């Protein structure tokens, strides 16, 4: 899947942010889970406001494929969800992806599926794609353990197919659980379509059964909304109306509304619509964020601190190294181009924790030359850095990588006054 563009996108200093009304496509995270649920249910129920992201379009197309090689491109969630889904299907399928996907570990999920009795083998390096997923040869078990500190998507992948296992599933989560809101999202959606589960301490049990099809409205994507909050944070004042979002959201990234309050941004909620407003409030000298449960907000909040000059301390970033790129390394490199330091703190700073803390120091200032920002085939690098062109002109490499999650990103940025 080639989401690159032959020329970088140049963004000059924008005008003052315009008031705008923006409608967001459905959440990629919700959409991808619902597509698996719909496929397993065997009913073609309607999904209103389904995500238009490349990841969701790819998953939808692959679920309509009968057999053969399934190529997910860069779509990590799609690969992980299909890994379990295809394990239930007849015949032998090959599951593969882009060159970057072949570098992203899949071992914990494959090991859990193998422990349950599924027939999966590596076609290349042990622990990494591509995979050959064959028909089941043995009785499928019920109990399995998995490390929860690597990726909640591994757990969600297993849970989504759990009602269709002969005896259901008893999943023991070992270690520290990352991105817990995404796991709770999975369980809430499963329950809405008829699955029954219990979660006691570190074990989730899902009863055997079936999903019952019903039409569903997919809430707008809060991860996409975070970039609108970022744009507002760089203004003295302004407001944006955002359609498609809900206050009582299934999405952990809805916490951006709370985080943005530190930067003088308020959020008013109405029925599937919100108004975000920036007031000329004195900024704090320092903010601290633990993003263990909202890792996809990291680049947004780092850019927010860098653009406003607020010192930031960040933790809970352990999963960022296995995303579309090593996001921590990418942030360190690209922020340096803007004369901003994003770096790990000495271990003694977090002596009582195994976590690594990172500090952001400095403020983006206007520079004479246009700065070229590398995106590393990572949609969130493009979307987090582009609003900083409010301060200094930027060139964004491979700018159409935003199609992965937010295809209308550049159009919406123009609505806000960016040029």
Image: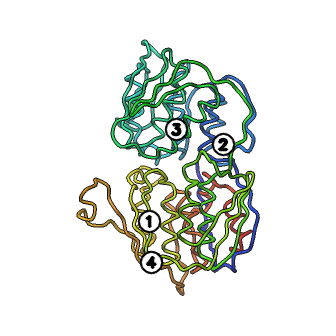
Residue 24 vertical position relative to residue 276 in the rendered view, above or below: above
Which disc number belongs to residue 57?
2
From the image, state whether disc 1 or disc 4 is nearer to you.
4
Q: Which mark is residue 123?
A: none
SS under mark 2: helix
Residue to which mark 4 is pinned = 285
Q: Secondary structure at mark 4?
A: loop
Where does residue 78 sit, x and y in percent of width and height?
Answer: 55, 39
Residue 243 in which image quadrant:
bottom right
> For the residues marked 4 and 3, what is the alpha-carbon distance in whole angstroms?
42 Å
Please say if 10 is above or below 241: below
- Tell me where residue 240 appears, x and y as whole percent: 71, 67
Q: Earlier in the sequence, mark 1 or mark 4?
A: 4
* Viewer-nearest residue: 83 or 203: 203
Mark 4 surroundings within 10 Å by alpha-carbon count, few (fewer than 14), some (14 through 19), many (20 or more): few
* Nearer the camera: disc 3 or disc 1: 1
Q: Nearer the viewer, mark 4 or mark 2?
A: 4
Residue shown at 73%/63% (left/top)? 241
Q: Which residue is mark 1?
A: 331
The first of marks 4 and 3 along the sequence is 3
Inter-mark Cα distance, 4 to 2: 42 Å
Circle 1: element type: helix
Question: How far is the residue under mark 1 from the one under mark 2?
Answer: 28 Å
Observer-nearest residue: 175 or 114? Answer: 175
Question: Tag 2 or tag 3, which sits nearer the N-term?
Answer: 2
Q: Is residue 20 above or below residue 284?
A: above
On screen, residue 78 versus residue 138, left or right, reads right
Residue 253: % across, % down: 55, 53
Question: What residue does disc 3 label?
Answer: 79
């Amino acid at each position: 899947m080639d989401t690159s563009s032959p020329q970088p996108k140049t963004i000059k200093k924008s005008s003052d942010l315009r008031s705008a009304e923006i409608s967001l496509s459905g959440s990629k995270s919700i959409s991808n889970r619902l597509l698996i649920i719909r496929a397993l249910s065997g009913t073609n129920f309607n999904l209103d406001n389904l995500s238009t992201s490349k990841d969701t379009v790819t998953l939808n197309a692959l679920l309509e494929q009968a057999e053969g090689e399934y190529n997910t491109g860069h779509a990590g969630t799609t690969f992980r969800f299909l890994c379990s889904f295809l394990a239930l299907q007849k015949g032998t399928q090959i599951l593969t992806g882009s060159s970057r996907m072949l570098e992203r570990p899949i071992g914990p999920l494959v090991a859990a599926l193998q422990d349950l009795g599924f027939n999966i083998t590596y076609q290349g390096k042990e622990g990494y794609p591509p995979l050959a997923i064959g028909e089941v040869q043995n009785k499928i078990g019920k109990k399995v353990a998995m490390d929860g500190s690597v990726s909640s998507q591994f757990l969600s992948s297993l849970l989504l197919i759990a009602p269709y296992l002969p005896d259901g599933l008893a999943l023991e989560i070992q270690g520290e659980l990352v991105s817990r809101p995404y796991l709770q999202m999975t369980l809430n959606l499963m329950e809405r379509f008829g699955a029954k589960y219990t979660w006691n301490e570190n074990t989730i049990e899902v009863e055997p059964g079936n999903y019952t099809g019903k039409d569903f409205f997919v809430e707008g994507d809060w991860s996409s909304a975070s970039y609108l909050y970022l744009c507002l944070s760089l203004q003295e004042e302004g407001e944006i109306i955002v359609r498609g979002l809900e206050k009582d959201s299934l999405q952990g990234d809805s916490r951006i509304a709370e985080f943005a309050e530190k930067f003088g941004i308020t959020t008013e909620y109405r029925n599937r619509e919100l108004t975000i407003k920036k007031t000329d409030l004195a900024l704090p000298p320092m903010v601290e964020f633990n993003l263990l449960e909202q890792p996809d907000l990291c680049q947004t909040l780092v850019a927010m601190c860098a653009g406003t000059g607020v010192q930031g301390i960040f933790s809970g970033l352990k999963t960022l190294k296995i995303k579309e790129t090593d996001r921590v390394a990418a942030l360190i490199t690209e922020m340096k181009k803007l004369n901003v330091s994003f770096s790990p703190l000495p271990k003694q700073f977090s002596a009582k924790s195994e976590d690594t803390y990172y500090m952001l120091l400095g403020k983006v200032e206007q520079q004479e030359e246009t700065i070229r920002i590398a995106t590393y085939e990572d949609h969130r690098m493009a979307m987090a850095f582009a609003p900083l062109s409010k301060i200094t002109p930027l060139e964004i490499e491979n700018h159409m990588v935003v199609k992965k999650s937010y295809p209308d990103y550049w159009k919406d940025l123009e609505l806000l006054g960016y040029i």
